[in-house]
Image (spheres, rainbow, N blue to C red):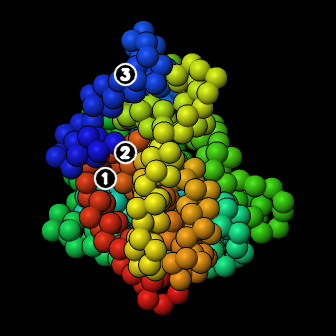
């Protein structure tokens, strides 16, 4: 883990150390070199299976974007929004607000393709660099919204149940801490990237699209392009409306994978419809070509992530038995954290930051939620002896686990979906977000120690 983190800090690709350490860990645990070799492949295979839903939504949305560009609807679609997003600075704020609202109700998974398809092209044309747009989506969605999980409350439930405290109490404190962390990180990221914001220019969008599709950008405006410039945003807005309806007036649940499936399925149907209207006689070939290009782009974005995720999946009891091909399910990451628990001093401040660090370590598996039972249990155990409220400690641990593993500082998490829609390397997004997120977590933890 230290080797991989150190490699990232030196701005080097971590695929090679991840593969090597997966092999060595497999050999060390089983005592067989052949099993170690098999572990390298098994880890990547299982990681690919777990990440394929993200992989698929990248491919589908990229294919739809190409279909819209072929008919000339992409530029027409973004013109109305462009009247509001008049420059890169305002665009940064709008992307944050929209992403946060959608992610708060439905988790970031369906929010990423919606924002990526509808708002990001407009923001880039307005002068916002793709890396800044990616950072805005990550910090608002995978960070600020997901770390509180205030509406769906799965994260607070996991934390509170393990800590033996009220769910709503953890949710309320987590909301405050998530906002403190998020606002701090968003402001710092803006200050870091402000100098890269340029004046509004269509050439920014053209340059961003280069290398993704071979479709010409000088497609004439016709009734077809105007029609789909209206139909596509309307369909996605109806999806958002349906999600809101199910959240408030029914017992249905569309968070996470269900929401992504709705968005992805709609994108495929729109792709077929767009291609059918554009060139009816070529619809079979054009849809297939767009999907192939989308999958090629998804492979390019996801390829390096899979072996890295495989290494950290090996540290989770949920996947280790399948990877190692054994009956036992070792939990290397959690065992590492548990071994360090006795070294945490029994004082409020040190305990709070110790729980934060433990949460961050558990988030290295790229999940964010898998470590919450551990941080919650530690919060319940360490609260009375440290003089800290277990509710506060559970909320702090939740911040560390979700901000890191939920997709702001881990390139093999759902952050890869943002990398896909923004066409920015995942590790580059991590580098930009690293310092703002770390400072934000420190600020929110200090606030919790002083005022909760």
Quarter of the figure with residue 139? bottom left
Residue 77 appears in view: no
Tell me the crowding category of disc 1: few under 14, some 14 to 19, or many 20 or more residues within 10 angstroms, Cα based. many
Q: Nearer the viewer, residue 433 or 260?
A: 433
> How much space separates mark 2 and mark 3, taking CA atoms?
21 Å
Q: Earlier in the sequence, mark 2 or mark 3?
A: 3
Q: Nearer the viewer, residue 380 or 191?
A: 380
Mark 2 sits on what residue? Answer: 411
Instruction: Find out whether the residues at labels 2 and 1 contact each other: C-beta distance under 8 Å.
Output: yes
Q: Earlier in the sequence, mark 3 or mark 1?
A: 3
User: For the point 47% across and 66% down, which residue is it?
Assistant: 355
Q: Earlier in the sequence, mark 2 or mark 1?
A: 2
Looking at the rendered structure, the secondary structure element under dot 3 is helix
Q: Return the x and y of residue 280 as percentages of the image width and height.
A: 57, 26
Instruction: Find out whether the residues at labels 3 and 1 contact each other: C-beta distance under 8 Å.
Output: no
Q: Return the x and y of residue 335 as percentages of the image width and height.
A: 50, 45
> How much space separates mark 3 and mark 1, taking CA atoms?
26 Å
Tell me the crowding category of disc 3: few under 14, some 14 to 19, or many 20 or more residues within 10 angstroms, Cα based. many
User: For the point 39% across and 12% down, which residue is it?
Assistant: 33
Q: Nearer the viewer, mark 3 or mark 1?
A: 3
The extreme bottom residue here reads: 451
Q: Is residue 413 above or below residue 141?
A: above
Q: Return the x and y of residue 58 as percentages of the image width and height.
A: 47, 39
Mark 1 sits on what residue? Answer: 430
Instruction: Find out whether the residues at labels 2 and 3 contact each other: C-beta distance under 8 Å.
Output: no
- The circle on residue 23 is 3
């Amino acid at each position: 883990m230290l080797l991989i983190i150190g490699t990232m800090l030196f701005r080097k690709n971590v695929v090679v150390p991840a593969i090597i350490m997966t092999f060595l860990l497999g050999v060390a645990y089983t005592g067989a070199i052949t099993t170690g070799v098999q572990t390298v492949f098994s880890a990547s295979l299982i990681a690919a299976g777990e990440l394929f839903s993200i992989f698929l939504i990248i491919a589908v949305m990229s294919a739809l974007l190409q279909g819209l560009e072929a008919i000339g609807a992409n530029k027409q679609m973004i013109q109305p929004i462009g009247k509001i997003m008049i420059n890169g600075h305002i665009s940064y704020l709008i992307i944050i607000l929209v992403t946060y609202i959608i992610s708060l109700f439905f988790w970031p998974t369906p929010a990423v393709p919606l924002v990526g398809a509808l708002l990001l092209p407009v923001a880039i044309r307005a002068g916002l660099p793709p890396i800044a747009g990616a950072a805005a989506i990550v910090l608002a969605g995978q960070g600020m919204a997901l770390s509180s999980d205030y509406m769906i409350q799965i994260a607070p439930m996991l934390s509170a149940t393990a800590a033996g405290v009220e769910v709503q109490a953890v949710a309320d404190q987590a909301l405050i801490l998530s906002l403190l962390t998020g606002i701090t990180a968003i402001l710092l990221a803006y200050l870091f990237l402000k100098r890269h914001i340029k004046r509004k220019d269509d050439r920014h969008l053209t340059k961003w699209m280069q290398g993704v599709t071979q479709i010409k950008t000088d497609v004439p405006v016709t009734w077809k392009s105007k029609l789909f410039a209206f139909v596509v945003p309307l369909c996605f807005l109806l999806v958002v409306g349906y999600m809101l309806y199910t959240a408030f007036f029914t017992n249905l649940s569309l968070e996470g994978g269900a929401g992504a499936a709705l968005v992805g399925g709609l994108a495929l149907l729109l792709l077929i419809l767009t291609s059918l209207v554009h060139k009816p006689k070529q619809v079979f070939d054009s849809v297939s070509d767009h999907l192939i290009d989308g999958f090629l782009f998804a492979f390019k974005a996801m390829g390096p992530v899979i072996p890295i995720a495989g290494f950290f999946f090996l540290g989770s009891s949920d996947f280790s038995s399948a990877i190692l091909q054994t009956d036992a399910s070792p939990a290397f990451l959690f065992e590492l954290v548990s071994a360090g628990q006795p070294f945490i001093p029994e004082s409020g401040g040190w305990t709070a930051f110790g729980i934060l660090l433990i949460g961050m370590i558990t988030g290295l598996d790229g999940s964010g939620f898998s470590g919450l039972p551990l941080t919650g249990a530690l919060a319940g155990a360490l609260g009375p002896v440290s003089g800290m409220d277990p509710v506060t400690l559970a909320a702090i641990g939740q911040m560390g686990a979700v901000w890191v593993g939920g997709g702001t500082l881990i390139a093999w998490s759902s952050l890869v979906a943002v990398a896909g829609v923004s066409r920015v390397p995942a590790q580059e997004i991590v580098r930009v977000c690293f310092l703002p997120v770390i400072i934000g977590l420190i600020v929110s933890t200090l606030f919790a120690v002083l005022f909760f």
